[in-house]
Image (spheres, helix red, strand yellow):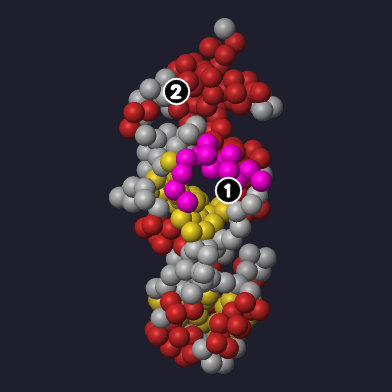
Amino acid sequence: MNGKLFVVGTPIGNLSDFSPRAIETLSQVDFIAAEDTRVTIKLLNKFQIATPMVSYHKYNTHERGEEICRRIENGENCAIVTDAGMPCISDPGELLVKQCAERGISVCVIPGPTALASAIAVSGLSTGRFTFEGFLTVNKQGRREHLLSLKNEKRTMVFYEAPHKLPATLRDMYANFGDRKISIVRELTKIHEEVIRTTLARAYEQFADGSLKGEIVLILEGVPQSKQQEEITLEYAVALAKKLTEDGMSLSDAAKESAKVTGFKKGDIYKHMIS
C-alpha cells in the first residue's frame, strides 16, 4: 500500500509560526526530503524531531525524486520541506509533486507561512488580483523578455529577489515600466522586518548602492488606469522594437518581441522600423 507525500510549510523567520500540525507531521513521517539538511536539522533539533532526512534540491531533482517516489510506493510516508516557507512555490519541490501526481501517489498539504501571501498582504497595493512572477533570471535576454512580457500587465506583480541583485532589478524595472508604485518587503517575521512603500524611481535612486539587505519580496503596481490605453499603440510598438535593436537585437527579432508584448503584427512593426 502506498504511503503519502506531505508538503509541509516551515517558518520564514519567526519559529513561533511553526504549527503544531506541522511539528506532528514531521515527527510521524518515515523520512523528510529537505532542500538543505544543514538548515532543516536546526529546526528539527529545536522541536526535538528525530526523523531522518534526505537531501532534495535543484541539482538532484530527477534522480532523488524517483528514489523518493519508490520509497513512498513501498509504503513509507515522506514530508518535503524547504529552507523557509512553503515548499513547491518557486521551488524544486514542484517537480516532486508532479512526479507523485503522475504515479498516482497521494499528496497532502500542511499549510504554513509563505512570503508571497504575507508580503502582498502588507504591501498597501491592490490585492484583489495579482500575478506571482518568482525570481527574475540573471540571463540578460531572458530577464528582458520576462519584463517585456509584463509591460501591459494590469494586475499587481509579485517578485522574489536576492539583495545583491536588487539594484540591477530596480534599474531594469524602472527602464521597462517607468515610474510606478512599489513596495519592498524584507525580512518578513524577523526582528528587522520592514515594508518600504515607494516608487521605482525613488527606490532605484535610494538603493542603487546595494545597501538593502535581507530576504526581499517586491510588490509592483500594475499598469495605472490612466496609462492602460495610451501606451498600446503602433507607434509605441515601433519605439519598443527600436529600443530592443539598441540593445543588440536584429530588426526582425526586435519586431517579433515587440509584437508579443503589444499585440501588433510583426510585419507592421518591421515595416515602420525600416520606413
Inspect the magenta stretch and tell me whether residue 144 lies in it.
no
Front-most of residues 232 and 179 = 179
x 47%, y 20%: residue: 236
In the picture of the structure, the residue carrying the numbered disc 2 is: 264
Are dots 1 and 2 in contact, CB under 8 Å?
Answer: no
x 41%, y 62%: residue: 118
x 41%, y 49%: residue: 131
Front-most of residues 12 and 148 = 12
x 33%, y 32%: residue: 225
Residue range (magenta): 196-209
Inspect the magenta stretch and tell me whether residue 201 lies in it.
yes
> What number is the disc on residue 136?
1
* Residue 127 seen by the camera: yes
- The amino acid on which the numbered mark 2 sits, given as a three-letter code, is Phe
Mark whose residue sits in front, 1 or 2: 1
Q: Position of residue 246 (x, y in %)?
A: 66, 23
